[in-house]
Structures are given as C-alpha cells and as structure tokens.
Amino acid sequence: MNRPNVTPGTHPIEQGHYIVPTREVLRLMESMIKIVANRMPGMIVYGRPRIGKSKAVEYALNYLPNKLGAPIPIFITNSNLYRVPSEEKFFKDILNDFHLPDPIKRKPTELRRQIVNLLMEHGEKSRLRRVILIIDEAHRLTEYHYNWLMDIYNELDRMKISMTVICIGQPELLSRRTYFLEQKKAQIIGRFMTHEHEFFGIRSKDDIRFLFKCYDQVSEYPENSGWSYTRYYFQEAFEQGDRLENSATEVFELFKEIRKEHGLSNSIEIPMEYLAYTVENAFKTYGANGEAANWLTVNHWREAIKSSGYIESEIYMALA
C-alpha cells in the first residue's frame, strides 16, 4: 500500500497539534464525567508544570458529550497574571477568551452581565441546562476572583442554569484550597473546589507503553487513511511487525539513565510534553522524511530525549 502523500510540514507530528491519551488522561476523564454527571459545581485539577493537564482536559472534553448522552456548552478561559487584580481586567479577559468583541470603557457590572447572558443563552439551549467553565492557570486566582465568579454562578443558579467550574493549575491551587478551608471560606470551597484531582506525568514503563501504543494504533493521519503515526514514518518496519510500544521499557530506562548522568535523583515523573517532543524528534529526524532509518535504535532514542529539552527542564525544576 502506497504511503499517503502529505504536504511537508502539515503532518500532526511536525505541527505538534494532536492529543494522544495516556492512562492518566483516561483517569482524569473518569473524574470529570462523575463531576458533571453528578451535577457537582466544581473541581480542581493540579499537578507540576507542563505534565499535560490542559491537553488532558481538552481530550476529556471532546468525549464528555457522548458520555453524558447530550451536548453541553463548554467555555475555556485563562487566568492572566496582574500585579493588582480587578473586576474589569478579569471580566474583559474572560470575554476576550470567549471571542467576544473587546468591550471598551464599560463598567464591571455590565461586563459581568454580558458574561452571564452568554452563559445563560447557551445553558438554556442545552437539554441539561448546564454549562462548563474551564479556567486554566487557576493557581493565579485570588479570593477576589472566586468571589467575582461566585456572582456569576449565583446569577445563573437563579435562572436554573447549573455551572460546573473546572480549575486547572499547579500545586499552589491545592494550597489555595487548604487556605480557604483554614479561613472557613465554605462558600468558595462549596462552589469551586468540592473535588480535587492530582494529575501525574509519565511514571512507569507501562505508562509509556500505553502511550506508545496510541502512536501505533489510535493515531491516524490523514483521517480514515489507516496510517498511524508510527506506520507513516516507519512503513517498512511497521509492516514487518515493529511497534513503538515494544520500545517502552528501553525508552523508560534511557530516561532514568540520562537523569542519573545529570545528578537527578528524585522520583521520575516525565511531563507528557517532553515525552511527546522525544517521539516527535525521533520520528522527524530518523523517520521516512529524515534519515530514513529502518527502525529506531537506542542511540536514536537517546539523542531524541536529549533534544527534547527534558533534562534542562528537570534541572531547572530541581533548582527552583
């Protein structure tokens, strides 16, 4: 079978615009389904930087309507960092992330009303009368922000529209929840932090095997072509039975070995981003569009890991 003719630079491996599930992604998806199906108002998803939390939520959200049996409006916003938080900045950022016209010179109450009206409009069209709000970089949110969100939540609730807020952030997000508990801020915990989910990176060879199997089987480009990412870049080896998943133990041991070489002795947790970079480097450099190696060797994998930026990131994290 002839290899698909894909325009150079457009394959997902080259662009990096794709999501393959890990076991941790599926675990998160199960948590999110329970939260939304049980009409719980909020949850926090936290973990170390760059381990794939936002991408995991994006993947889970793609499957959520099917799991719930009905479409559900989903809105995503990013929490920006300001020296001094204000209602106006907060609401303007949300409206901007919702791709609404920039509201120049409007009062915070008017901005909030515009947000509420939009959420209400979509919630009323939903058979479930529900909306989901995803807030990324939520560890930046202060008590002020949560109070402003509470105003939106309460207005929707009066209109019999339920809003589930999923906050994604770094471990400081859990610390913020602990602080609110100590300060007896039950109204914030009850609306936005009823459930917590710690998200982990890749921690075992089985995690890598599961992920690599997705490159072998689940991934596909062009769509409905039958050409997985592994097959596209290593056609001959793939047709002879080679699979990326069989390299999982080898790659995991290499990560541990390289960490040891650089004096990194803490427990291993590979951010999904850097494992994806490693695979992409290997495919692009040694696959059919690069050196056209028949299959990936240990040395190929070693160079791909070194080129991913993983070690530099881990050293920085260890010193931070």
Image (spheres, helix red, strand yellow):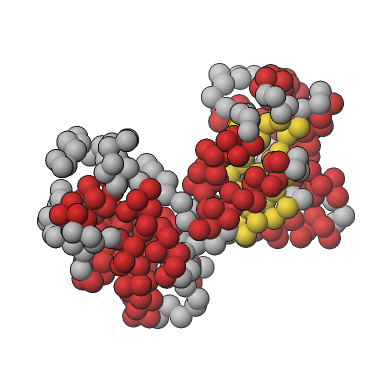
Task: Tell me: residue 306, above or below residue 4.
Answer: below
Residue at 31% across / 57% down in the picture? 279
Tell how many labels. 0
Vertical placement of 126 versus 316: above or below? Answer: above
- Residue 139 visible to the viewer: no
Residue at screen point 73% across, 53% down: 195
Q: Is 315 or 82 nearer to us in this picture?
A: 315
Q: Position of residue 285 (x, y in %)?
A: 19, 55
Is residue 235 rendered to the left or right of residue 173?
Answer: left
Looking at the rendering, which quadrant does residue 258 occupy? bottom left
Residue 238: percent from left, percent from top: 22, 56
- In the depicted structure, whether residue 174 falls above or below residue 79: below
| Nearest the eye: 1 or 14 | 1
Res 77 → quadrant = top right
- Indicate left or right for 93 with 15 as reference: right
Quadrant into which the N terminus falls = top left
Residue depicted at 72% across the width and 20% down the height:
124
Q: Is residue 131 above or below residue 27?
A: above
Left or right of residue 257, residue 86 in this image:
right
Q: Is residue 130 visible?
A: yes
Q: Nearer the viewer, residue 90 or 163?
A: 163
**Residue 257, position as x, y percentages in the image:** 34, 78
Residue drawn at x 32%, y 43% is 220
**Percent position of residue 282, x then y:** 24, 58
